[in-house]
Structure formats: structure tokens, C-alpha cells
Amino acid sequence: MKLYGRSWTRQEIEARVGRIEQIGGLKGIELLDGREKGVEQIQVRTGSGLTAYVTPTKGFDISLAEYGGVPLSWQSPNGDCHPFFFNPVGKGWLRSASGGLLMTCGLSQVGTPSRAVSDENTKLGLHGRAHHTPAKLISAEGYWENDEYRMILKGDVEETGMFVPNLRLKREIHFKLGENRFSLKDEVENIGFQSAPHMILYHFNFGFPLMDEDTMVHFPSKKVESIDKDVSQTDYDNWQNPEANIQEKVYYHRDIKSMEGRHNWSQVTIFNPHFPTPFNHSTPLSVTLKWCTDTLPNLIEWKMPGEKMHVLGIEPSNCLVEGQEAEQENETLVYLEPGEKRTYQLEFEVNENLVDNNSQS
């Protein structure tokens, strides 16, 4: 493996540490206070700077993510609030959503509160239930593969009920010691016996100090549209200092370009030329989110540079954010037939000291 500026064999590493967790690895954590009490997390340290807190209690999502001890993600005022406090009605989701690097929205409803297309008497709240559903069949394993130390986390999230669609998400997240990246693979299956509406959105949240006044965001879109027609279409790719009473902005990115040399994959890159380190100096830093557009053809941007709500959301999805009814009316609502599966793949990477060339590579 490559670590601390050189290559090592497994034998060389193990000869120098009492256990691998001295330099990186997995550790289970349980939160003990307030509305976070009882929330279980898995701390993942890659040994080369990236740390992430995977949260099985909340949809197997990812809460705080750091590079060199400095945060990359935005944390909401709710903290890692336990799903016990989740109110699925209307916009109740906002009172317990954690923020963090990733909140999964779905599995059958995303965006504006709506009504179920199969039953107009069934109300669907903001962004669905996935982020507030504890995972089951959880595993977290670290193992050597020749001279590489790999970490794989697995868990299932089920959205089920009587007389309603039944969906199951099987998630895998892969890390490697010495690399500041991870890959995420989801498989969503209709485990019921009727056709099921399926909406999913990967709500990645980036915050200070990654997001600062000099930060630029490079999108792969040829066209950008604001949900609010009165909002400028031109300021979607820059950032700013916190502003009081500013309104959130939501953009749809259209005509997504593929990455060079990687058909049907795309990426968004966030570049900060002066990312702070714990050693009182700064470094150019890029954070890149990649995804397979075969099953995630849409890209949504949530821009909220307000006070306290100082966050950029990058959101690959299979839908827009106007609710299940609107998706049905637009004839874009995805359905899964009984036993049908849909696979989603994303990758996240941090790179230091790279030059910002505004390219999609």
C-alpha cells in the first residue's frame, strides 16, 4: 500500500503497529446524549487523511466527513438526531435530518410533500423515509488482500408496510487504507408483489471550510435551470460568505456530459485553493463526486449560503424534487416491477495540491 509518502508491504506495516487501528481502520461508536442518544456509527479512517462516520441507525448514511481533521461536510442544527424523533408528515423531515456528507432521500418519495400516486389519501412527506430508517444485517469488515488493507461496510434499509409498496436497499461502501476515496454501491429491489414507484436522490452536503468565498464548483452540465424562474441562472458555480436572510436556490443541471474515458459516468468537482490544514497553512484541495448516469441521469444543486445554513448540496438522482405526483404527471416516475432491481454507483475522492484546470476528466 501507499502510505506516508512511500509503499509498504503488509509485513512492514504489521511489524510497526500493535494493531491496524493505530493508523486507520474501523471503530464502532454509540452516541450517548440528547436526541443523538442511541445512534450507532462506524468511524472509518483511511490513514491518509480521510475520516468518515457511517451511521447505520440513519439509513446507513454518512455523517461527518473530514480531511486531516478538517471538515468537508456540513452538519445540520439537528446533529445526528435519532430516528425516534422523525416526523414523516409534511416538512417534519427538516427537524431531524442530520446533514453530514450523505443523506439518502427516497425510496419512493423525494422532494416536495406529495400524495401517493397509488392512493390519493396517502400523504408523502418531504424526501421520504430512507434517511430515518435504521439499517439491518450490518457488517463492517477490515481485511488484507495481499499488501492492501480494504474496508467494506454493508447494510440493508427496508421501506415496507401493509398494502403499500415494499422496497429494499442493499448498500456497500468500500474504503482502502492509504486512499482518500470511497465507492458506494446500492441495489434497490422491489420485494413486494405489485409495481412500486421508486424515487432516489443522493443528498451530498458540503460545508465550511471547504466552502469558502474562493471556492469554485465545476459542473458537467451544458444547461442550468433554476426552479424559481426569478432566480439568476448564472451564479450556480461560485460561493460566498454567509448572508443573512438569503433564500435557498435549487438548480436543475441538464444535458450532463460524460467523463473523458469513462462513458456514462459524470462528476462534480469542488475546488478550494486555500483549504486550511491543522498546521496553520493552506493547500489547494479538490473534492470530486462521481456517479453512473445510467441509473442516476439527473443532477440537482441546492445552494444555501446563509448564516448557519451554509451548505452546498450536490444531488445525483433518478428524479426531480417536486414529489411523486409531479413525477407521475411528467411521465418520468420510475417503477420497479416485483423482483426487479436497480443498481446505483457513486464515488467520492479528495485530492490535495492539484491545479484547478476547470476540466472534466
Image (tube, helix red, strand yellow):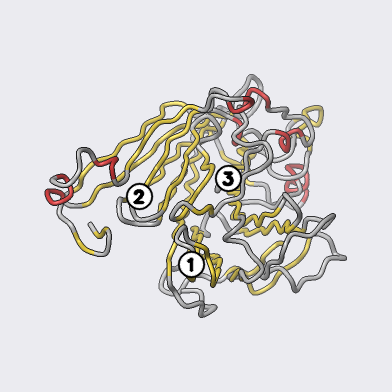
Image spot of residue 110 (x, y percent): 68, 43
Badge 1: few (under 14), some or many (20 or more) residues near its Cα, within 10 Å? few
User: Residue 195: in sight, yes or no?
Assistant: no
Crowd rating for badge 3 (residues with CA inside 10 Å; few <14, some 14–19, many 20+): many
Q: Position of residue 327 (x, y in %)?
A: 73, 48
Q: Where is mark 2, residue-wise?
A: 46
Q: Earlier in the sequence, mark 3 or mark 2?
A: 2
Q: CA distance from mark 1 to mark 3?
A: 25 Å
Q: Is residue 261 above or below residue 25?
A: below
What secondary structure is marked by label 1?
loop
Q: Quadrant of residue 244?
A: bottom right
Rendered view: 107 above or below 83:
below
Count the marks. Answer: 3
- Locate residue 45 relative to residue 198 in the image: left or right: left
> Hey, what amino acid is under mark 3?
Gly
The residue that appears at 81% across and 70% down in the rendered structure is: 232
Identified by mark 1, the residue type is His
Q: Which mark is residue 281?
A: 1
Quadrant of the frame with the N terminus: bottom left
Q: Earlier in the sequence, mark 1 or mark 3?
A: 3
**Cα separation between marks 2 and 1:** 22 Å
